Image (spheres, helix red, strand yellow):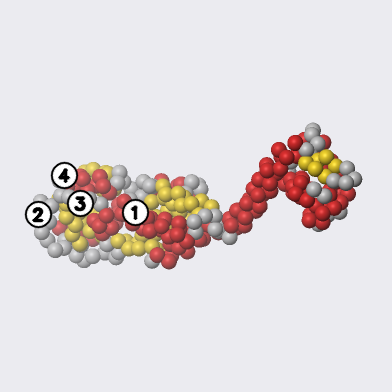
Amino acid sequence: MDVRNAQAFVAVAEELHFGRAAQRLHIAQPPLSRLIRQLEADLGAPLFERNTRKVELTTHGEALLEPARELIMLSQRMREIAKQSELGETGRISLGFGEAAANQIVGELARRVRQNHPGITLDLVNSQFWHTGIEKLIDGRLDLLIGRWDLLPAEVDSFVIGYDDELITLPDNHSLATRESIAPAELAAEPWVVLQGGNSQLPNRINRLAQAGGFVPRIVQVAPDSSTVLLLVAAGIGISLSLSSIRDNLPTRGVVFKPLNPGNDPVPVRMIWRRVDRSPVLNKVLNITKGLF
């Protein structure tokens, strides 16, 4: 039974009169009668007892009446969902982010999406390191990605959602730990703990810092994430280049953060997406994100 058959069947079942049912459906009575006869033949059972005086449902018809109504309601609901999807009011968006430092941004965005567009589901995907995150974005496994990059592929569009200040992270017992600020040249002899690379900004900016200080950084350990970097710095393995959002959002026991003198430009935090993506749902989430900053 398709939706058209279900509508015809329900109209006759509720009116118990082929003429009134045909008027209700805005069709002539003979086509309606043929439609019902064909439906009965397809189902292999009579749906109505009819004679010149009255029309009544058979037991088979009574059993099928509610399922037919449900089929009609489901069809109507599917049309509504399709319309809402076209308008960007329903759908799913996968958002990747790579650091606990982005949690506050992501949490507020998720709250706003739920509040303003309850039909949109925001799937949050944590631990997306910058290089693997971009790969997933380009091949469609992610729709949006938050991170920090000096360079982005041509396939990607972006806008800035915030800024971070660069800071030097030191063990709290380091000889420079009591200084108000640190010059790049003062770090020439230091061992470094660095975040694993890809296109993230921190590894690139360590190289810029080393150029400004006239030294080659002596990297003693590479860490998978910022939390591990802080643990290694606290253990005295080395120093690291960090960000103000990491200082403000991750546990920092045993470490101190010091600004550079002279300081570098703030590090932009970006929301990125595929340039070819014209999804109305994506546009809704992007507009909410822009409204946060």
Sooner in the amino-acid sequence: mark 4 or mark 1:
1
- Per the model, the C-alpha gap separating discs 2 and 4 is 15 Å
**Image position of 234 with respect to 277: above or below:** above
Numbered circle sitting on residue 103: 1
Of badges 4 and 1, the one in the foreground is 1
Q: Residue drawn at (38%, 66%), measured in percent from left and top?
A: 293
- Per the model, the C-alpha gap separating discs 2 and 1 is 33 Å
Quadrant in which the N terminus is drawn: top right
Residue tagged by mark 4? 235
Sooner in the amino-acid sequence: mark 3 or mark 1:
1
The residue under label 4 is which amino acid type? Ala
Of badges 3 and 4, the one in the foreground is 3
Sooner in the amino-acid sequence: mark 3 or mark 4:
4
Q: Residue drawn at (38%, 55%), measured in percent from left and top?
A: 106
- Per the model, the C-alpha gap separating discs 3 and 1 is 16 Å
Residue tagged by mark 2? 175
Residue tagged by mark 3? 252
Sooner in the amino-acid sequence: mark 2 or mark 4:
2
Q: Are marks 3 and 1 in contact (CB under 8 Å)?
A: no
Residue lying at the far front of the rendered structure: 53
Of residues 29 and 81, the one nearer the viewer is 29
